[in-house]
Amino acid sequence: MPPYEQTIATARHALAVLIGQPPEALDTEFDLSGSMPSLPAVVPVGLPSTLARRRPDIRSAEDSLHQATAQIGVAVAAFFPDITLSGTYGLRNTGTRYLFDSASNFYTFGPKISLPIFDGGSVVANVRLTRAEAEAAALNYRKTVLSALQDIEDDLTALTTDAARSASLRDAVLADQRALDVDLDAYRHGILSYINVLSVQIQVVQARQQLAESLLTQSTDLVKLYKALGGGWENAPRLDDEKAPPVAAAQP
């Protein structure tokens, strides 16, 4: 038991730190033992391509693409002349009696023109660079989206196949339990020895252990699917018993 208790404590501390709490914050909440949480009966996946936009990596790639395409317009704008009109006005005098004298007024006015034709080579090169960066950003966005869709499909497949495996293991546990009941009854009537009963008991325990491991794997698959979709659903219906395995529902 001590190695398992150490593993549980380490995982509990890591979970507390993950949600921004001190390591011992969840000790009281997880102090009592209980059954595994029930899994949703149906996972409302919907359209993966729509839900996947909630993922931070897709949002980041999309923002980078928008920024890169905007820089093309900035680079193209450098081809056009830049004209600036500026001027100054003031007074200069040596005494207050000259304050309203027109001879003491001064002003300057003139345009400032920047013509890019003299450095057109650098402007053209800058436009080509920004377009190349936009193409790279578009390719990176496409790659990020495809990788996200692959994660979703892989996790959906894993969740569905592990749900089917859990259903088969439940049937195996029920069959082994019925066999154990029959052997116990035969033992009470003196037909079988207790060695036969022990063998079937070991088989039942092993089947239950395999079912528990399969349910754990299935729960992990569900967490991975939520992560791949950028979030989860708190209002999904849950299974009240362990007879029907969770099935992932995805629209094509």
Image (cartoon, grey):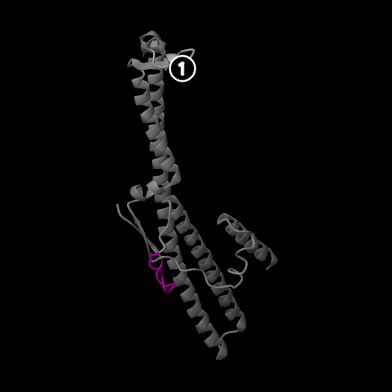
Q: Indicate the position of residue 59 as horizontal and vertical percent values.
A: 41, 42
Q: Is residue 53 above or below residue 66?
A: below
Above or below, 180 against 206 in this view is below
Q: Residue 188: percent from the left, percent from the top?
A: 56, 90
Q: Residues within 10 Å of mark 1 (few under 14, many from 20)?
A: few
View extreme (top): residue: 118
Q: Is 180 or 247 nearer to us in this picture? A: 247
Locate the N terminus and report the quarter of the image it occupies. Answer: bottom right
Magenta residues, dominant SS class: loop
Q: Which of 42 and 176 lies nearest the eye of the viewer?
A: 42
Magenta highlight range: 235-245
Q: Is residue 143 visible?
A: no
237 is within the stretch colored magenta: yes
Residue drawn at 45 percent across, 60 percent down:
162
Taking the magenta stretch, the answer to whether it contains residue 149 is no
Residue 236 falls in image quadrant: bottom left
Q: In the rendered view, would you say 150 is above or below 101?
A: below
Asked whether, in this view, residue 108 is left or right of residue 251, the answer is right
Report which residue position mark 1 lands on. Answer: 96
The residue located at (38%, 27%) in the rendering is 71
Question: Going by the picture, which residue comes out furthest to the bottom?
Answer: 189
x 53%, y 87%: residue: 185
